[in-house]
Amino acid sequence: MDHLSTAPKFIVIDGHSLLYRAFFGTRFLSTTDGRPTNALFGFVNMLLNLLSTERPDGIVVAFDSPAKTFRHAEFADYKAHRKETAPELQQQIPIAKDLIHALDVPDIQLAGYEADDLVGTIALKAQKEGYDVLIVTGDLDALQLVRDGITVIATIRGVTDIHRYDAPAVIERMGLRPDQVADFKALRGDPSDNIPGVPGVGEKTAVKLLLQFDTVENLIERSDEIADEKLRHKIKDNTDQIRQCLMLSTIITDVPIDFEPTQYRPSDQTLAKATAFLEDIEFRSVIRRLPTVFAELGTSKPEAAKPTTELLPVQVNINSDAKTIVKEINTAKSLAIVTLENGIALATSGLTASWISFDLFPPQAVQNAIENPNLPKIAHDVKHQWLRLYEHEIHPQGLMFDSMIAAYLLDSARSSYSIDSLVEDYLNAHLPPITDPENRAAHIAAAIHQLREPMLAKLDKEGTRKVLDEIEIPLIPILARMEQLGVKVDADYLGELSERLNLRIEEVASEIYALAKHPFNIGSPKQLGEVLFAEMGLPGGKRTKSGAFTTNAGLLQNLALLHPIAEKIIEWRELSKIKSTYADTLPKLIRADGRVHTTYNLTVASTGRLSSQDPNLQNIPIKSEIGREIRRAFVAEKGYQLLAIDYSQIELRVLAHATGDSALMQAFEAGLDIHKATAAILFGIPTEQVTNDQRRAAKTVNFAVLYGMSDYGLSQQLRIPIPEAHQIIVSYFNRFPQVKAYLDKLVKQAREVGYTTTLSGRRRYFPELHSANHLERQAAERAATNAPFQGTAADIMKRAMIHIAKYLKDKSTRVLLQVHDELLFESPDNEVRQIAPELGRIMENCFSLNVPLVVDISIGPNWRDMEKLP
């Protein structure tokens, strides 16, 4: 097709093939009530891309009929090997038709014919009427329809990777003309349609025959000219089958349908109807595209039909008199705050905002208002805002709402928590395109006011408002203080440790070279794979698509049982990681106060747990001796001690509470070693006879149950055969039947309602539970099994931090770090032993379970060398 053609353009879409491609090419999505929508999402975005880039004069979508076609009548086994359509895709097909109707795009189907035949008939009809035709499909059979005025756009992977085929492109791909494509398929066959072709004739032979004889009819008539005797007999013996295959492969272009290509010009009514439909299936990002796409088609004025408008006009006062602003603030019902390095934006409502430059007015001009606990404060990413205010010696009080945290509670799997994305999703609007930072900050402050009510209404509806008000909001200032305080690090010690690590790394490398019989780059997975599998012939070598061998940690763990080189490589990797990640990096992060200041993320872990970065202090290994060496670098200030308080097996205690399993509850109530008690029950022996290996196995199984671990996963953890791991899990559930029943119920309910909840009411959504992809679905089931326990543990820790902060208000002890189930404090020498038991009691009593919460308390000069208190 000539892309400079002035002829009108008509698009014909094979609906079923695109939906199929979209279903398997788009990550699984569903509405909050569990309706699968991934195929719809890929399909509608492909459709809008076509409308936007091609701007067609007309369009139609053809669908397969559910009835059998004339091809089935001719060949009963036509498409017989195809699997039944996945239920999750089948559910989306009728919705796709409703979606097309909402967009006022015509669709067509006819009993007895496939979508291909309708596509071919309409394409040729439109071409004859003077249109340039684009056929959009996921099926390369349509290449036979290419000719002057007809081009095929074929999806290669999913619906975003496409290729445009005119006649030269078909020849380049297949080595044949478009009108030879059906003949090619008749000879080679097509397993996807169960078209047999000629036995023994593959792609190269089929192309060679058609280049010589042009068509299969010529080939049949002149088969005596085939030089290869075996091939000649194959053609002669299968003449009837070749003709039948040609009939099955040929797209019909004269289907008896009454269809006239008509102009596609969606109206304002179309926009309203499509918007309502897309709202129902929760495609907010697609809604935002509609006005622009429709405007490009020359349909309606975008300003008259936009579903996403700019926010309500905001009156912005730039550098107004500070006294006037403070007067307005003091009479406000709430105050939205946005800070920049050079000033602060304050909004008293969604319609008025002020910008105050600290170059013109001192920060203290607004200090009293910001520190007034009776004036409610709202912000986006409060912790970041508060840390900036701390730099000006301003300590905000009266925090009420954080739009970023509210969005996290409503959907902990969001890809973005930016203020712009929240305005689009919750206000169906957008911030005005302002580049001036001060003006934009003022508009953001006003936007936070507008966001508050709809977001709180949704939190109320979902029953998660209390999590925001009682856990997340009170925690924010505590984390900000912890980040501001930081933790003291011994830089000299880390320098010495780095030198020791370097020597050991060199020693281990030499040992690896000796075993491999030559030096190589151990850090290169490609070179390592060649040494282990190509040169040394170790078992288990699998090449990736790039041709390199896999050398992941799991594989090396298995090889360590067979050859010492694998164990040495594991050690080399751990030493190298510890050296680069901590020993060499931490000294560079020490600030002038001699302390390292991590940043806590509240919206990264979807379970509700906190994570830390720059540096990540939650990933320091504690099981290995070298990992504990890193902990030695974290020290107390002079005159202080470090105090660590760690919840004991908190997730297993939540499991016992939730399931009500009598054996687990009795063990916890009696204060037994839970892993030893589990081993005794699991192996049917007295507790005193449990071996270390049996306790280790029971501990692994206890956590395997929490994390939904598979037989294979447990076998890898315990390094035992899969059947043995399977039997251990079966035995566990036989011994703890209430646990099994509860976990099954948990996944079943999550599949029905789409989410799980913690004991505090925190929700986590799992749309992937309805995924057609088995592995994706299994991963979602494992996550749904664990989320209530890990999430409840996170909620308990956060509540403990809130209670502790209140208790420490007039004390000298301060919280430094939160790492998983542990809190690290810095406490004066003369206070630490008196305060430690009280802090332990607060942590044990901050949340009510049917089994006791228990903590372990340790004191010491550094994070490694700590004395455990009784």
Image: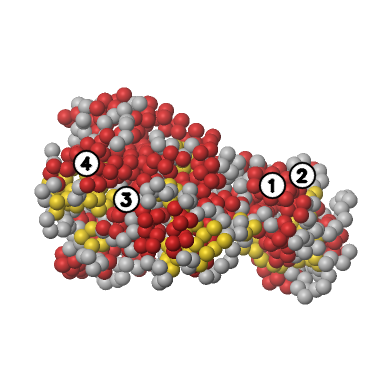
Check the image and report above or below for 681 versus 108. above
Rendered image quadrant of residue 164: bottom right
How far apart, in angstroms, are the residues tagged by discs 3 and 4? 16 Å
Say which amino acid is labelled 4. Answer: Leu
User: What is the distance, in whole Å, between disc 3 and disc 1 at their CAs?
Assistant: 43 Å
Q: What residue is at 69 percent from the left and 46 percent from the top? A: 277
Tell me the quadrant of the picture where the N terminus can be found. Answer: bottom right
Q: Find numbered disc 1 in the image and state the secondary structure of the residue it sits on.
A: helix
Distance (Cα) linking label 4 and label 2: 70 Å
Q: What element carries label 3?
A: helix
Give left or right: position of 30 versus 765. right
For the point 34% across and 26% down, which residue is it? 661
Q: Is 15 on the left or on the right of 7, as rendered?
A: left
Residue 851: image tag: none
Label located before the other in sequence (2 or 1): 2
Q: Which mark is residue 478?
A: 3
- Of callouts 4 and 2, which one flags the residue occurring earlier in the amino acid sequence? 2
Q: Residue at x 22, y 65 (%)?
A: 593
> Mark 2 highlights which residue?
65
Name the foreground residue: 784 vs 765.
Answer: 765
Residue that mark 4 sits on: 839
For the residue carrying disc 1, how many other residues have a C-alpha within 10 Å: few (<14), some (14-19), or many (20+)? some
Q: Name the residue under label 1.
A: 276
